Image (cartoon, coloured by chain):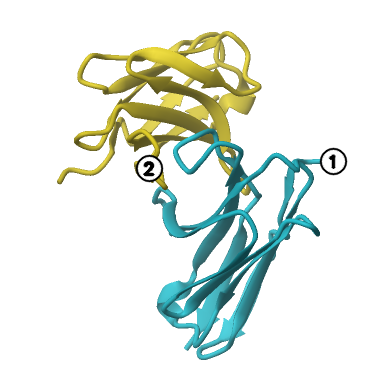
Amino acid sequence: QKEVEQDPGPLSVPEGAIVSLNCTYSNSAFQYFMWYRQYSRKGPELLMYTYSSGNKEDGRFTAQVDKSSKYISLFIRDSQPSDSATYLCAMSEGGGSEKLVFGKGMKLTVNP
Amino acid sequence: ETGVTQSPTHLIKTRGQQVTLRCSSQSGHNTVSWYQQALGQGPQFIFQYYREEENGRGNFPPRFSGLQFPNYSSELNVNALELDDSALYLCASSQDRQETQYFGPGTRLLVL
């Protein structure tokens, strides 16, 4: 079993839709949870950073962490064509600057 | 503020050869991590350098080696290249206890 599992999709939605992306994990030592966005031919960029369980909101993006279920989610409201990218969940034991364990990435396309 | 830069952008090598990839970290960052991203996969941690010392290593063989210089730039060396080494190699820099690693655009390596 991989440490981090993420459905690779692809996922195609119409503009304005609510998008839900999920990851599960097996390592209970993970304390820091991140979502990165990666555009084609670019490096990943950090979208959301959460420590331990709970919710975090930033504009149209909401990250949720449920440590009891070992499950994390990213919600995108009012999705835009510019949100079309690959979304990677990432986790670490010691913080965002430590070794990151990534999911496979979900390729999202938002159609105008 | 200059971001993370990597060189070269693309590289083609043949099996058995050796390759050196270079990374310039973001100004003020003392930590560099290297990741391998195979096609359709999430990045996998290779190793991290903190103030010129290796500070953690992933599940990669010894033919993957690295170096960090006093200006915190870094090199990734891969000896005896194999076909499976074909991937996007990402460098990420960070400062102690920061929330995030800042990724460069990557070097795309093709081994024939």
Up-down relation of residue A18 to residue B62 (above or below):
below
**Residue A51 appears in the picture as rendered:** yes
Residue at 40% in and 42% down: B101
Badge 2: chain ID: B
Residue picked out by circle 2: B98
- Name the quadrant of the N terminus of chain A: top right
Question: Can you give x and y, in whole percent of width and height, for residue A31 in the image?
Answer: 62, 46
Is A109 rendered above or below residue B2? below
Contact, mark 2 vs mark 1 (Cβ under 8 Å): no
What percent of the width, then of the height, locates residue A102?
A: 61, 45
Asked whether residue A40 is in view, the answer is no
Q: Which x, y percent locates residue B25? A: 27, 32
Specify the farthest residue to the left. Answer: B1
Report helix, strand or loop for mark 2. loop
Q: Which mark is residue A90?
A: none
Chain coloured yellow: which letter? Answer: B
Residue A20 x, y percent position in the rendering: 65, 75
The structure residue drawn at horizontal position 62% and vertical position 19%, both measured from the top left corner, is B60
Q: Amino acid at mark 2?
A: Gln
Please indicate whether residue A68 sits to the left or right of residue B86 in the image: right
Task: Give the camera-side residue of B108 and B94.
Answer: B94
Mark 2 Cα within 10 Å, few/some/many (few <14, many 20+)?
few
The answer to which of A22 and A28 lies nearer the viewer is A28
Q: Which mark is residue A1?
A: 1
Regarding mark 1 in the picture, which secondary structure is present there?
loop
| Colour displayed for chain A in the image of the structure | cyan
Name the chain letter of the residue that bears numbered label 1. A
Query: Which residue appears at 70% of the width and 39% of the height?
Result: A29
Amino acid under label 1?
A: Gln
Residue A72 vertical placement versus B102 (above, below): below
- Please state which of the two labelled residues, at mark 2 or mark 1, is closer to the viewer: 2
Residue in the picture at 28% in, 39% down:
B4
